[in-house]
Image: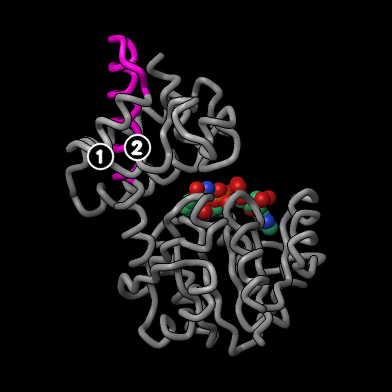
Amino acid sequence: MQTIGFIGLGNMGAPMAANLVRAGYVVKAFDLSADALVQAKEAQCVVAMSASDAAQDADVIISMLPAGKHVHNLYLSGAEPLFDVVKKEALIIDCSTIEADMARSIAELAIERDIDFIDAPVSGGVGGAQAGSLSFIVGGSAEQFEKAKPVLESMGKTIFHAGDHGAGQVAKACNNMLLGILMAGTCEALSMGVKNGLDPSVLSDIMKQSSGNNWALQVYNPVPGVMKNVPAANDYQGGFQVDLMFKDLGLAMELSQKSASATPMGSAARGLFNLHKSQGSGALDFSSLIRLYS
Ligand code: NAD
């Protein structure tokens, strides 16, 4: 059985690593947070002393880090760049959401060193990571995609091949721009309904069965008390941070600028999340945007 080095055991990485253990892989896990390492041990991961300890003997290395600068640092520019320690035949799968250009340039450097590096950002949230039902959106060669598929299938249900290196990140930025717009619109509609005397649960049921139906209404309602097991039911702790949604909308704006694509809705959503973040809500789940409307 293959050994997997897993780096980044946050809201998403921890349940993903646990699913790999359940699938029978030996998972050597590392995070900068001591609490995350305790949780990893409870999930039967082998706790590594450092990222290079997790990666050096691994057949597959998976990273699940906040942003591009962390990924660049891990593989290329940090104290112990993993490109200097991984086995030649190792496959590196970066599941973080980062700049498409950065994913492409890291992949180019990997090719020069005979290392396989692919981008495989995910969709499905913490619930999807826990249930092993994530979607993976892969950018890489057809051969690399086939090599990665069995591992990704242990953490997800749908594995897409978006295209060559960086394509996974382009598709992810498009998806998350739409998600930001949908969450903002859902918060706006629910707030207006409540201020006009409607019960948010009743209004949510109506819109779910009507043309306003969307993912936020189906599985991620932003109003406390409407759904169980969502961040809104837990004071917006856990889940997908406002900081990360703001980062993703920034990635979308970069793509929009480079390709001269008009994205006025994405830009408006970014402005809303920026305002919410500036009021001290960066660490809350992104569905807390509804507080901006109250
Ligand atoms: P998170 O902040 O909960 O976790 C990130 C983890 O990385 C933290 O535990 C942190 O300590 C660790 N870390 C940072 N630098 C490190 C380093 N150098 N070495 C080891 N560990 C390091 O974030 P998350 O919600 O798990 O998201 C991770 C990525 O997945 C982000 O790129 C995000 O955009 C993307 N994503 C998140 C969700 C979601 O719903 N949370 C959904 C899809 C995609």
The residue at the point 82 percent across, 65 percent down is: 49
Q: How is the image coloured?
A: one colour
Callout 2 crowding tier (Cα within 10 Å): few <14, some 14–19, many ≥20: many
The residue at the point 78 percent across, 70 percent down is: 46
Q: Which mark is residue 217?
A: 2
| Residue 181 sits inside the magenta stretch | yes
Which image quadrant: the N terminus?
bottom right
The image quadrant of residue 5 is bottom right
The residue at the point 47 percent across, 62 percent down is: 133
- In the picture, measured across the screen, residue 29 lies left or right of residue 288, that is right
Q: Main secondary structure of the magenta part?
A: helix
- As rendered, which of 72 and 6 lies closer to the eye? 6
- In the picture, measured across the screen, residue 111 lies left or right of residue 29, that is left
Residue 57: x and y, percent? 72, 83
* Residue 67 appears in the rendering: no
Q: Is residue 201 above or below residue 177?
A: above
Residue 105: x and y, percent? 44, 69
* Residue 198 appears in the rendering: yes
Residue behind mark 1: 213
Callout 1 crowding tier (Cα within 10 Å): few <14, some 14–19, many ≥20: some
Residue 170: x and y, percent? 33, 59
Amino acid at pointer 2: Leu
SS at circle 1: loop
Q: Is mark 1 within 8 Å of ligand 1?
A: no
Q: CA distance from mark 1 to mark 2?
A: 6 Å
| Residue 179 sits inside the magenta stretch | yes
Q: Which residues are magenta?
A: 177-200
- As rendered, which of 129 and 256 lies closer to the eye? 129
Amino acid at pointer 1: Asn
